[in-house]
Amino acid sequence: MTFERKPLADCVPELVATARGDRPATLVITGGKLVNVISGEILNGMSVGIQGGRIAYVGKDVSHLIGEDTQVIDANGKYIAPGLLDGHCHIESTQLTATEFARAVLPLGTTGGFFDAHEIANVFGLKGIKLMLDELRGTPLAGYMQVASCVPAAGPEFETTGAAIGPEEVAEAFTWGEDVIALGEVMNFPGVVYGDEKMLGEIQATLRAGRQVDGHFTWPSSDWRLPVYAAAGVTGDHECVTAEDVIERVRLGMYAKLRRGSAWHDVAKTITAHTEHGIDPRRIMLVTDDRSSESLRDEGHMDFVVRHAIAQGVKPVTAFQMATINTAERFGVARDIGSITPGSCADIILLDGNLADVNVVLTIAAGVVVAENGIMTAQLPAFTYPEEVRASVHLAQRPTAEDFIITTPIASGTLPTRVIKVRENHVETIERILTLPVEDGKLQVGQGDGLCKIAVLERHKGTGNKSVGVVEGIGFHEPAAIAMTVAHDSHNVLVIGNDDELMARAANAVADAQGGVAVITASGETLFPLAIAGLMSAEPFEIAAAQSAAISTALYNAGCTLNYAFMTLSLLALAVIPTLRISDKGLVRISPEDGIQLVPLFVQD
């Protein structure tokens, strides 16, 4: 089965002929309650006529469009709404390939999205992005790809990645097609503000190609440098955690993206910019950013986010606007997607019950019924990744327990030590200075103190780079360790534990699997293989979701009760998010005062 999305210009004669009644529609939907996200109304008794992959007619009566071969769907008692759009999503964070992601979200009513593949880009560069784009094009989704802007995220002096992308690569990617839509989140916002040549060059290449620039600004919204960032042409940002963040971005002409991922629960606070402060919602979008396969299975995708926004007091129609037309307008593709209007792509969902329940019972993508009652009805083509993408973990040597020993400049006593403190359901961390004991020239961590060691081992080029630090807030109440090749954004091997031997075993487990997540305790080992670039499972969605859930269970049983813990832990190596992180080069601190800098583990008096 193919899912054709022709340009509107190529479809005009057949759409007009169908609308006149001279050519039968391929599919019609009759007698439903139309969610008109353009006018903000619910219109009763409305019908929709479709020709191929686009909408030919919207009105009360479509009987003149029905022929012998026309598929007719009776929507009596149901809502007819545009398919949901995710305005900021990393497919790799679902641990699924693009095909399996489509299988997971289409039954939930997501028919398109704007995908930033900067995870695989940090492993394989433009080649990785192109592979994901090619796979995405074979699915029914209206999939738009963004070019990763920060590869590496914080610069080679701060971390080692598998590839690098600069202005020339960005310009090349925009020649691949109109579905390469934007420059992905510009996480190196200090570089933009202070005139980094590479970052400004990437933005210029994007603007010259007539594309959009997405943002990632994590300093306070009151900071004088937010308008500087906006002056570079950044017109959308998902790093909103307060109502003020939303308000200031909208006032500067940006689209504010409100995030409800697996572990990032920002909508409840940020939506008050509209519900309490009265900010016009047309520049507010709902997005997921990062959702694991487990949370897709257990909670949902954009349907869950829309439902959640409505529960915070947003009018249902307004919430649907935030996940459809607002998103399409932000990226300049509202002529094609985001509404049920003549000429638009036929991406439509039917909903039963109350609109606020967001109960999707049928999904049409590109004019084809692809899912019904929560089950895919369309078969998707297989996509094969090359062998090098399935063998991307290249450690210099097999880790041993000795690799996780932290040697100290003193033989015994105590040392003030920088510690990364994890915050549940938040992307930012806290820098803590704790006085820790030293014995025989080794820092003592995990001796009933609630602390763990955290290490990053370089895995792209076999350099042997590694660093070891201390983290607080993991919660292990027994000897335990977790290792993962999902370690945003450089995706080296991240290891956390309170037992050096178990840390070594966990690191070797994911290396032997050529990527994945491993939790090891005295009672056993739980492994979630992620062989595709060390980021995505080669298994179907259902199996991947079960394996992801098994990791959550293993962490919980070991005492780590963080909500969707794996998602939070995987960000501890993301060097451009405040306040303290770790990479293969050492501890990285980011602050409004000092920007990004490497800092020592031990604090000097």
Image: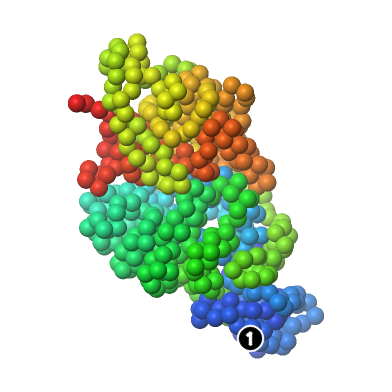
In this rendering, the answer to whether 439 lies above or below 282 is above
Q: Residues within 10 Å of mark 1 (few under 14, many from 20)?
A: some
Horizontal relation, residue 592 to residue 28: left or right: left
Q: Is residue 208 visible?
A: no
Q: Is residue 371 visible?
A: yes
Q: Which residue is drawn at 34% across and 19% down?
A: 437
Horizontal relation, residue 405 to residue 127: left or right: left
Label 1, secondary structure: give it.
strand
Residue 15 versus residue 464: which sits nearer the camera? 464
Q: How many marks?
A: 1
Q: Which residue is drawn at 57% across and 59% down?
A: 304
| x, y percent for residue 316 | 54, 71
Residue 181 versus residue 60: which sits nearer the camera? 60
| x, y percent for residue 537 | 60, 41
Residue 302 versus residue 491: which sits nearer the camera? 302
Q: Which residue is drawn at 24% across and 53% down?
A: 193
Q: Which residue is drawn at 60% across and 46% down?
A: 294
Which residue is label 1 attached to? 59
The chosen color scheme is rainbow
Horizontal relation, residue 339 to residue 266: left or right: right
The kind of residue on which mark 1 rests is Gly
| Image quarter of residue 69 | bottom right
| Image quarter of residue 141 | bottom right
| x, y percent for residue 393 | 51, 31
Q: Residue furthest left?
A: 605
| x, y percent for residue 261 | 50, 52
In this rendering, the answer to whether 129 lies above or below 286 is above
Horizontal relation, residue 46 to residue 287: left or right: right
